[in-house]
Image (cartoon, rainbow, N blue to C red):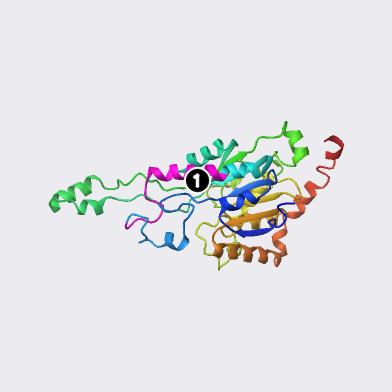
């Protein structure tokens, strides 16, 4: 197979340059957390530059991600349309595409995915409470006004508590898209082994799968319906300095819902520190990870190698294998 040299490997490459090398109709699930195009957090973003508060791409005194620029969304859409078109090509009929985004630019991302030919089936919401408010006060600008101090104080008092329109963000949206099926869902599943969701998967207190999830204990009712296992201190790795590491349980949840075949391939075109690949491997699935940053590629490979040394991390595979055994033995009789 054309993908043999890529499967179960992390590739250091530019995604748009690499994806054309992936075989058409060969991937079961794409799960990724792409660059969000906030400030200079675009497809060329550099971790050290972003972390430097005085970098040239952000307004002085503003952390990366707070600057508002309408061009961000337009550039994000144009770039992600190209990415989505390649993902559409490589996914099997009925294959799933999960893509994280920021609330502010989700519409641009979803539009790009939609315009590439996908069906937007739903949107997941990762709900959390631990985040800093992004709004900025205007006292700094009032101080610079060419008026007397008494007038400045009056304005400050009048606008006390009024800040830039950036509410504390407590969720991340995730687009759930699907490549159109080859005839009916049943025929597609029997032929391509993808296209349906596993509703045996449970969330919270043994609840039916939902499009909302959290890894934070928030409230008894919310936890009962939507709680996933909290990230452990060990799963990230103390050597992993990636700024946006996703909880392993979230990636596992999405993969368990959508990847049926024992030979399923899960691809992450922006694998970062490798959480998607780790989740796929942990669940007994194949993976392909791509990242342009050599440092992150090495971190991903280290996390994957450490998984081999921790057999307890494979505790979920038994149920997956039991579910799959014989699942498509009827294929040859029907197809």
Residue 333 part of the magenta segment = no
Q: Position of residue 261 (x, y in %)?
A: 75, 46
Of 116 and 301, nearer the camera is 116
- Please say whether residue 104 is visible from this viewpoint: no
> Which quarter of the rendered picture does the C terminus lie within?
top right
Tell me which residue sits at (40%, 44%) in the image.
71
Is residue 71 part of the magenta span, yes or no?
yes
Q: Where is residue 107 shown, x and y percent of the image?
A: 48, 39
Residue for point 66% across, 48% down: 255
Apparent side of residue 262 relative to residue 64 in the rendered image (left or right): right
Give the magenta-colored segment's residue range: 60-83
Q: Position of residue 143 (x, y in %)?
A: 20, 54
Q: How many numbered circles are shown?
A: 1
Looking at the image, can residue 58 be seen? Answer: yes
Residue highlighted by disc 1: 79
Q: Secondary structure at mark 1?
A: helix
On screen, residue 240 above or below 133? below
Location of residue 5 (image quadrant): bottom right
Counting from the top left corner in percent of width and height, residue 158 is at 22, 45
């Amino acid at each position: 197979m054309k993908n043999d040299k890529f499967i179960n490997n992390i590739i250091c490459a530019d995604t748009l340059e690499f994806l054309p090398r992936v075989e058409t109709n060969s991937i079961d699930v794409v799960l990724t957390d792409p660059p969000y195009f906030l400030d200079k957090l675009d497809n060329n973003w550099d971790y050290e530059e972003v972390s430097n508060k005085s970098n040239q791409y952000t307004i002085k005194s503003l952390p990366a991600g707070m600057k508002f620029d309408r061009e961000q969304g337009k550039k994000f859409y144009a770039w992600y349309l190209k990415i989505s078109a390649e993902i559409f090509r490589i996914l099997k009929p009925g294959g799933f595409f999960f893509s994280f985004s920021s609330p502010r630019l989700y519409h641009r991302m979803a539009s790009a995915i939609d315009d590439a030919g996908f069906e937007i089936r739903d949107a997941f919401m990762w709900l959390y409470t631990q985040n800093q408010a992004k709004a900025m006060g205007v006292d700094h600008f009032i101080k610079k006004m060419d008026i007397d101090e008494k007038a400045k104080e009056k304005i400050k008092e009048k606008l006390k508590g009024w800040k830039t329109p950036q509410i504390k963000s407590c969720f991340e949206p995730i687009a759930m898209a699907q490549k159109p099926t080859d005839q009916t869902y049943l025929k597609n599943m029997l032929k391509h082994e993808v296209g349906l969701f596993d509703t045996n998967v449970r969330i919270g207190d043994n609840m039916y799968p939902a499009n909302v999830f959290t890894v934070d204990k928030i409230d008894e009712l919310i936890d009962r319906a939507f709680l996933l296992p909290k990230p452990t201190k060990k799963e990230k790795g103390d050597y992993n300095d990636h700024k946006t590491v996703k909880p392993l349980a979230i990636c596992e949840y999405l993969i368990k819902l959508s990847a049926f075949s024992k030979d399923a391939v899960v691809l992450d075109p922006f694998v970062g520190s490798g959480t998607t690949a780790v989740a796929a491997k942990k669940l007994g699935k194949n993976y392909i990870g791509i990242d342009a940053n050599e440092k992150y590629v090495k971190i991903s490979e280290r996390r994957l190698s450490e998984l081999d040394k921790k057999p307890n991390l494979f505790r979920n595979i038994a149920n997956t294998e039991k579910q799959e055994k014989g699942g498509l033995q009827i294929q040859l009789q029907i197809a």
